[in-house]
Image: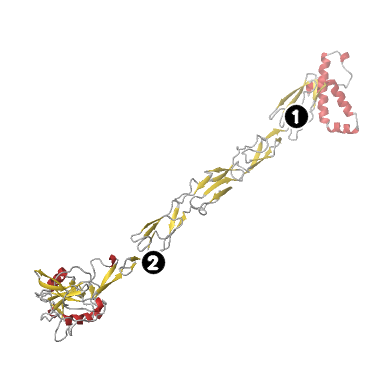
Amino acid sequence: MSCGAASISLELENTCDLHGSCLALAVSRGTAVGLQSAGRTRTLGSPGTYLGIAAITWGMVLWVEVGAWTYHYSDQGDYTWEQARNFCQTFFTDLVAIQNQQEIEYLNKSLPYHGRYYWIGIRKLGGIWTWVGTGKVLSKEAENWAVGEPNNRRSNQDCVEIYIQRPEQSGKWNDEPCNRKKKALCYQASCQPFPCSQHGECVETIGSYHCECYPGFHGPECTDVVQCAKLEPKGVPMNCSHPYGDFSYNSTCEFGCHEGFERRGAGVLRCLPSQEWSANIPTCTAIACPVLSAPEKGEMNCSHLHGNFTFGSTCAFSCQKGFVLMGPESSECTATGTWTGDAPRCEAIKCSALTAPNMGQAACFHLHGNFTFGSTCAFSCQKGFVLMGPESRECTALGTWTGDPTHCKAISCPVLSPPSRGQLSCSHVHGNFTYNSTCTFSCEEGFVRMGAEMLRCEAMGNWTRDPPVCAEDSAFLKQVLAYSSGTALAVAGLVLSGGLIALLAKRLSDREEKKKLLKPTSDLGAPGTFTNAAYDANL
């Protein structure tokens, strides 16, 4: 067969307002309806553009290459819708996807009449009319149905034909059962297999195409990439991946922090199509430890590298005078937000425990614990004793007590001696001749004790009586007479002591009678005289 010589020109809008975009898949045979892009003129069957005839089992199909979007139809044989699409996809791109009303008018004028008409690339999928080449739903604005269509007669009309050269409703669409046989109306896309640098969608226009770039790309062929500002974080480690160039669309940067620091903000930033980063650059802040305070009765001195009580901070501890540090001398804030070591404390320095002195009492007052720094003890002694040493002592910061040890010493009385011609026998409870010591006196034969037999040392340091004396018996009476004849006061005293005098006189009388029996009368003394021996013996 041969191609006709008639030519038809038509001005068309290079838009894709009905179905969207189409991608090229193949080129091969068919009777070509060529659309030449140069000068916005499309030519059908132009002489001299015929390139060849390919004999294929589908039948003889002629095609004319014009370097742009071209239309093709099956010259021999009719096909079901599925067969028609297979034919188009095998040798061209796909069943025709109608671009706009001008394209419909062009096809209606350019294609030959065929009683069964032509299949186009619309089919009902899931109950929705869809452009099969793009998978896009047929919009209401793009519909070109004939009057009363689609009617889905017998509920099996899921494919679409176009009326070409029909007396009525020419160029309109009609739904038909898919198993009916019609001509395949194909198109050859002008988009190449990998157009738009694979960064955009190739949008077919009659005789040409243009790229609708994906987000992040721009330029005629979508070769230019959106650039974001270069990231230069300070003190924040960053690791970036740049699939399309440094800090360009889809560049991702991950952020971390050094040991002891934690991130504040997003961990990953991505360069967006808007030339902005998905978030602000994060910051790294030092990990915080609990705030420390000085121990009670102590001081604290801290050094902060990255902020108060944060990673790397160190605190040294000390205690006030009189206290000793228990625990570590310093602590450091670690990367885990904890301090090294246990919390220190200050304990009062201890002195040795004091006890009350013997025969005394101790009254103690403790500021910081029993017998620790600042404790004071006051001492006193029992009756008859005197305090030796300081009245009070204080525990010092050195752990020692002020002053010497305190004790209670028994009060002393004057030392007693035996009387002349007598003996002295003493009992000492707290020391020789001290408080509560007792002394008993006695006289030799022929002597009589003048005074108390026993004396006791009192709390005031004196004896209960004056020490007695031992006198001879003869001298005793003389002393009595001397006392009796001395003064009227003495006489009055003797009268008051008449009973005693009478007793003494009786004893002397009895003694004289005994002497008379033993001695000659001439040896007797003068009448009315006494001897100390007689007094001492009967006292």
Task: Determine the image quadrant of residue 407.
Answer: top right
For marks 2 and 1, the one nearer the N-term is 2
> How far apart are the two marked residues, 2 and 1, measured between alpha carbons?
121 Å
Q: Nearer the viewer, residue 190 or 313?
A: 190
Q: Position of residue 41 (x, y in %)?
A: 23, 79
Please identify the residue farthest to the bottom as the structure is shown: 168
Q: Assign a secondary structure to mark 1.
A: strand
Task: Determine the image quadrant of residue 468.
Answer: top right
- Residue type at mark 2 is Gln
Residue in the picture at 45% in, 53% down: 261
- In-image side of 441 versus 48 (left or right): right
- In the figure, 229 relative to 364: above or below? below
Q: Nearer the viewer, residue 313 or 50?
A: 50
Q: In the picture, which quadrant includes the C terminus?
A: top right
Q: Position of residue 6 (x, y in %)?
A: 15, 81
- Pointer 1: what residue? 455
Q: Nearer the viewer, residue 161 or 189?
A: 189
- Pointer 2: what residue? 275
- Residue type at mark 1 is Leu
Q: Is residue 123 something one can see in this rendering? A: no
